[in-house]
Amino acid sequence: MGPAGPVNGGTSPADNPGYPEPDWREPPEVIRGRRDHPWIKRLEPLMEHPGRWACVSRFDNVRSAYQIASKLRTVEVKRPPGKWEFSANKTADGSGEVFARYIGPE
């Protein structure tokens, strides 16, 4: 509602006698992603070996490896909590590998 009344000439719910009363209750818990996300499953074993690098994925081309490493760094892809490092490398045949290292809790 703007200062002159309802937007676009509509009616306000408060002005409508047939509008239902408020439903007083807490909103449901927001679920932010699946716990069984493939990257969570793939990275969780590294948490048992803090500071140790591991190759966690291979791609047919290095560009895909660089993209997923970037998405893991910026948390565009769901990953386990904590501090992480990610790196992508080009192999001799032109394919790509993604490496990850769990540093520890935040």
Image: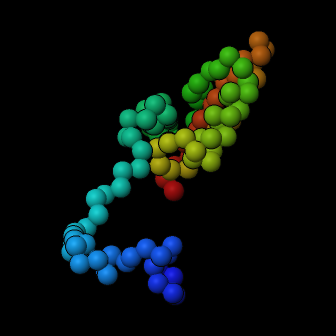
Q: Report the side of 43 relative to 68 (left or right).
A: left
Q: So how many labels did they put on this image?
A: 0
* Quarter of the view holding residue 15: bottom left
Q: Is residue 51 visible?
A: no
> Horizontal and vertical percent for residue 27?
29, 63
Residue found at the far top of this picture = 93
Residue located at (37% from left, 78% from top):
12
The structure residue drawn at horizontal position 49% and vertical position 34%, both measured from the top left corner, is 39
Q: Identify the residue at image location x=46%, y=31%.
A: 38
Give the image's coloring scheme: rainbow
Q: Position of residue 20 (x, y in %)?
A: 22, 71
Choose top left, top right, bottom left or bottom right for residue 60.
top right
Residue 73 vs residue 90: left or right? left
Looking at this rendering, what residue extends furthest in the bottom direction?
Answer: 3
Residue 79 coordinates in the image, percent (x, y): 50, 42
Horizontal side of residue 105 vs 58, given as left or right: left
Q: Is residue 52 left or right of residue 25?
A: right
Residue in view at x 67 percent, y 24 percent:
97
Q: Is residue 31 visible?
A: yes
Q: Position of residue 106 (x, y in %)?
A: 51, 56
State the residue in front, 76 or 41.
76
Residue 34: name its quadrant: top left
Q: Give the residue furthest to the front.
A: 9
Vertical comparison of 26 with 47: above or below: below
Image height check: is 21 above or below 43?
below
- Frontmost residue, 25 versus 80: 25
